[in-house]
Image (tube, grey):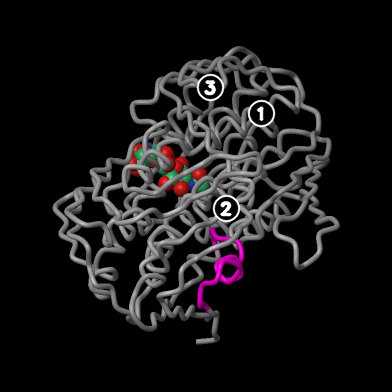
């Protein structure tokens, strides 16, 4: 297992290329199940989760081919061809490693009339149930059975009729599953209180390119007119707004100045707003976003919320940044109940953070010092890297497989802007 060793104190400066969005890619890949024709995805990030999803697709009989990218390039192109689907079962072994596997349920049900997916296990950032995924599919006419740790979904003979579902809680994944099921339904479906995250818009845009009929894209009330079949398409994955936001925090904590090439400011308005409140200058230009620290960092009160609110996936990284702000900050996490696991690790590095339920109070500025720390989940791991970049001395981050799930060649990108970071065999 690898570890990362970071010697803090270098001011980050230069350009970081932003990869395709992991969370968009994880819902675009299963769209290939909806058509007999090939779907080609460009700008796919090279990540462990994407490899995992590729294996899952292969397990269904989908062929996958990676085209013409050099090892030194970021991103890659994948063509998925689901001409013949030979299995509709997503086994435990593949699903347990990657929660997003549940996103095959909707498209598989739509195309094959049935799907059997292992229940995703518990997850480090909270309980993360899938009840809303299942309820939405039931509302569209599916029959759902839970047996021996598997969800079995079946459409009536002749396919899903379609229907209406009002989400009691905004859920990104459940909205994605419902959309992918509804596009091939016999009738019209409506979703209320659907998630509006940019990754959902990316999904809708691919589905439309494949011939789907979706009204109100980007809104919380979506109408989907089912079509008989979908064609193939070639589609470029949107830039990763969380990766871009994470590197903005990394630059800011070092008093640095980075260009985030390819980042899209419209997708990350709430993060930009938070960063500006903390005192970071953010400018958009034709190539992306320019983030520049300008004097002392200011404390902030931040609350996560569904889009267009502040992304929960940015909470940990912003918390690290606020450890260096001059004053007391308050962060409220409203999406997941157990998403402060970075706090004890940050405390070991000298941060002064108290938590009470879903609120964290950060007292700054802290004198951060290097330490041996453990990554607990993807974004929590990034928060440790950010703190380490500003810490005195050396930090060793272990269990970095979490980072490899979501940040394409993190240490290379940070080295590009002058960070002292290396990956070592543990
Ligand atoms: C996705 C993102 C994740 C991000 C999250 C919130 C992917 C692969 N992952 O996760 O990075 O942090 O959105 O923006 O895109 N809930 C239920 N029942 C359900 C589903 C969800 O109660 O069936 C609850 C969850 O426990 C949570 C809230 O809804 O409290 C939001 O979760 P959801 O939006 O579904 O997150 P994911 O799609 O799993």
Horizontal side of residue 351 vs 31, given as left or right: left
- Pick whichever, 140 or 99, lies toward us: 99
What residue do we see at 80% from left, 51% from top?
A: 63
150 is higher (above) or lower (below) than 386: above
The residue that disc 1 covers is 205
- Pick whichever, 176 or 147, lies toward us: 176
User: Do the numbered discs 2 and 3 sit on residues whose CB atoms are within 8 Å?
Assistant: no
Mark with earlier residue (1, 3): 3
Please report the bounds of the magenta region as a residue range: 405-421
User: Do the numbered discs 1 and 2 sit on residues whose CB atoms are within 8 Å?
Assistant: no
Number of residue marks: 3
SS category of the residue bearing label 1: helix
SS category of the residue bearing label 3: loop
Residue 20 image point, x, y percent: 64, 49
CA distance separating discs 1 and 3: 25 Å
- Mark yes or no: residue 270 visible: yes
322 is higher (above) or lower (below) than 421: above
CA distance separating discs 2 and 3: 48 Å
Mark 1 burial class by Cα count in 10 Å: few <14, some 14-19, many 20+: some
The residue that disc 2 covers is 259
Horizontal side of residue 4 vs 363, given as left or right: right
């Amino acid at each position: 297992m690898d570890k990362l060793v970071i010697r803090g104190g270098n001011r980050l400066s230069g350009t970081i290329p932003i990869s395709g969005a992991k969370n968009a890619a994880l819902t675009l890949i299963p769209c290939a199940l909806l058509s007999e024709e090939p779907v080609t995805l460009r700008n796919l990030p090279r990540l462990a989760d994407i490899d995992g999803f590729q294996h899952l697709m292969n397990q269904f009989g989908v062929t996958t081919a990676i085209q013409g990218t050099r090892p030194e390039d970021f991103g890659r192109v994948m063509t998925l061809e689901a001409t013949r689907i030979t299995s509709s079962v997503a086994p435990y072994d593949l699903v347990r490693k990657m929660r997003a596997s549940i996103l095959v349920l909707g498209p598989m049900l739509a195309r094959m009339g049935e799907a059997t997916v292992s229940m995703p296990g518990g997850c480090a950032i909270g309980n993360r149930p899938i009840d809303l995924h299942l309820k939405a599919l039931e509302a569209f006419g599916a029959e759902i059975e839970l047996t021996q740790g598997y969800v079995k979904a079946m459409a009536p003979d002749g396919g899903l009729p379609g229907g209406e579902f009002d989400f009691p809680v905004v859920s990104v994944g459940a909205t994605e599953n419902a959309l992918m099921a509804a596009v091939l339904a016999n009738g019209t479906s409506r979703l209320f209180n659907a998630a509006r995250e940019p990754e959902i818009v990316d999904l809708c845009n691919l589905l439309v390119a494949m011939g789907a009929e979706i009204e109100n894209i980007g809104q919380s009330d979506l109408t989907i007119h089912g079509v008989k079949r979908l064609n193939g398409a070639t589609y470029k994955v949107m830039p990763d707004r969380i990766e871009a936001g994470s590197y903005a925090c990394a630059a800011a904590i070092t008093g640095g100045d980075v260009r985030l090439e390819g980042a899209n400011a419209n997708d990350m308005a709430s993060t930009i707003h938070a960063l500006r409140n903390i005192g970071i200058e953010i400018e958009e230009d034709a190539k992306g976003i320019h983030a520049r620290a300008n004097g002392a960092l200011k404390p902030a009160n931040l609350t996560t919320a569904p889009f267009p609110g502040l992304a929960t996936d940015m909470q940990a990284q912003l918390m690290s940044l606020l450890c260096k702000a001059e004053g007391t900050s308050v962060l409220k996490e409203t999406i997941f109940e157990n998403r402060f696991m970075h706090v004890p690790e940050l405390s070991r590095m000298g941060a002064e953070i108290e938590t009470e339920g879903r609120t964290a109070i950060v007292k700054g500025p802290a004198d951060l010092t290097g330490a041996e720390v453990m990554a607990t989940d993807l974004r929590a791991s990034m928060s440790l890297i950010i703190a380490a970049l500003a810490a005195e001395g050396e930090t060793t981050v272990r269990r970095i497989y979490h980072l490899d799930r979501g940040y394409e060649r993190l240490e290379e990108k940070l080295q590009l802007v002058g960070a002292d970071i290396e990956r070592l065999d543990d």
